[in-house]
Amino acid sequence: MNPWVILKALFLREIKLALHRRANILTLGYFYIMIATLFAVSMNGDAKALQSIAPSALWVSALFAIMLSLNHLFTDDFTDKTIEQLLLAPAPLSMLVAIKIFVQWLTSAFPLILATPFLGIQFGMGAAEIGSLLTSLLLGTPTLTLIGAIGAALTLGTKGSSILIAVLIFPLYIPTLIFGSSAANATLFGHSAEEALVMLAALLIIGIITIPYAVAVSLRIALE
Amino acid sequence: MKINWYKYSSPKTFAPLAEKLAPRFLSVSLILFISGLYVSFFVAPTDFQQGEAYRIIFIHVPAAWMSMFLYLVIAFWNIVGLALKSRLSFMFAQSIAPTGAIFSLIALTTGALWGKPMWGTWWVWDARLTSELILLFLYIGYMLLQTAFENQQRADRTSAIFALIGSINIPVIYFSVVWWNTLHQGASISLTHAPSMALTMIYGMLLVGLAFWSYSIGIACLRVCYRIQIREQSIIRLTQAKGKADALE
Amino acid sequence: MLELRKITCQKNEIPIFEGINVKLSAGECLHIKGGNGSGKTSLLRIIAGLSDPEDGTILWTGENIKHDRETYHANMLYLGHQPPIKENLTVLENLSFMLALAGINADYEQKNRALKKIGLSDKISIPAHMLSAGQKTRLALSRLPSDNRKLWLLDEPFNSLDSVAISCLETLISDHLTNNGIVVITTHQPLKIDPGKLKVLELSV
């Protein structure tokens, strides 16, 4: 049996379902903008101070936005029981999971990447800075989605799972946040962003190789 | 002495054994702790640079060791539980967790108490303290996850996977925090810059460390007993309810 | 071809059933009966490999199903009693996905015929959330004519179906058995199957 037929079909289905959830995706972008704005307002619009915290504030806002969108990843399939069919498909579950996570990243990172340049300008960031921020987000958000998927799979079906997911994956997010914000803050603090970006890439590669399998195991446990 | 391991792998038979062992471990721990404190306060010399206040490391260092060691023990018992499907292994891991979290908290507080007289701040984001803080969060996540499920088997296995993922991440987290520190603080003060160790200081820390270890075993035994009791009671309750339902038919 | 060996199931440490032994060959149908809470759905999920039994093994053509999941899935179809369909997608999109997930590449004609057989061809482009409960069940069942996997596990498939749909499903099951397939089914309904092919397992509470 050719697993590619199945993987392609799942990818197309996920895209179709995402299009039905267009409003949610835009709300995510709006949420990101909201959190960033809260940072700015709480600093009284002090331009200098804002500039110094801009990359970190935007990174944390992006992290929050991703964390809060994770609930959708498996819950919809769980509620209508289509997830059992995924578990019983004649294809490796880790690959099916990888596709779901990939589409989840596409739909959650997309509004963030779009909104970031505008927020950057609002915070007084220069073009080069916005560039490093975008690169670090591009490399970092997939890892955040991958790690978040573990939280989503482990807490599948529980009440109040949004908060629980956040509590669980928050310690696991630290390395990605450290490297991501270092890269974004590079121009500000005058060191090269390269090393941090390499670390981010390394985390991403390790994540892609190991996490889908862990998520598959967690899903099977969640559906026993 | 040939111990029949299988006999003790059932919660029912393990409980009386644990009840007997607990007080022994706890009393040994008390003796070790008192001797450890004696060595720390009266035998170990005053530090040339840091005066008397440094003595808090006799609690800080063993507590930090224990918090990390216990996390590995928890990971171990969770692996055994997943591989052998034994409920008792999961109970061990879950009974150790609160102690590990407490040691982590002690390490953090003693770290702060040490920092203040030394360098004037209650908290420093150095690599070790930050990693210890994240370890505490991993403990809390592990304990919180167990409360989220009604089905005990799912609670056991889900929290086990989380503990394993946490333990694999600990080196990654430590590495990233060290990297971050060297980037921003360079050759700055580190709270872990322990004074060069006199032999008596090492003895002191070892004694306290062993005391903590013995205490952990003792208190974990008590917790396991308690959990087994609760499990037995709920089985009795459910069987009685089932009996009533059957009788009604 | 399908064997259940000493299957024991527990929920919250209370045994639900113990020591179930069944052997099924090609062309046979197993009807699992029992009152509410007797574990019919649990047993079916164990056979599907979704849950692990407390004790015992499931064997497919002599192999433990845990040893090669994908081969087992390639030969097995499971339908739980909540029809697994996506409300936001149309009837056709749902059917296409269900077949694709089984690795089946059916063309539009085939799908149309399958929907006609189950009585949903006039609803082919309607989003699934507009269907009634019975129609949703029929949508879940619409994959059966095109799905050539040997083992069918059906949990309460007759729920919400009207008499036309019921006889349609019975025909599908009989045809499958005639083609050397195996069916394991839980239902309260009496089954109109050739008694020579029928085995009954009664689970008591």
Image: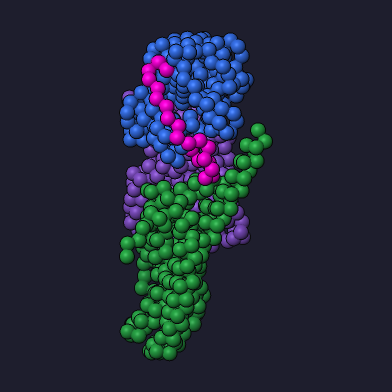
Q: Nearer the viewer, residue B212 or B102?
A: B212
Q: Can residue C146 be seen here?
A: no
- Depicted B70 relative to depicted C141: above or below: below
Quadrant housing the N terminus of chain C? top left
Q: Main secondary structure of the magenta part?
A: strand
**Residue at x 45% of width, y 59% of height:** B14
Q: Colour of chain C?
A: blue
Image coordinates of residue B236 in percent, x first then y, are 59, 49
**Residue positioned most to the right:** B248
Image coordinates of residue C173 in percent, x first then y, are 47, 14
In which quadrant of the rendered view does residue A102 lie? top left
C162 left or right of B48 in image? right
Magenta-highlighted residues: C9-28
**Residue at x 53% of width, y 35% of height:** A78
- Depicted A17 relative to depicted B211: above or below: above
Q: Can residue A79 be found in the magenta stretch? A: no
Chain identifier for the purple-coloured part of the image: A
**Residue at x 54% of width, y 43% of height:** C14
Q: Colour of chain B?
A: green
**Residue positioned most to the front:** B247
Q: Can residue C158 be seen here?
A: yes
Q: Nearer the viewer, residue A128 or B221?
A: B221
Q: How many marks?
A: 0
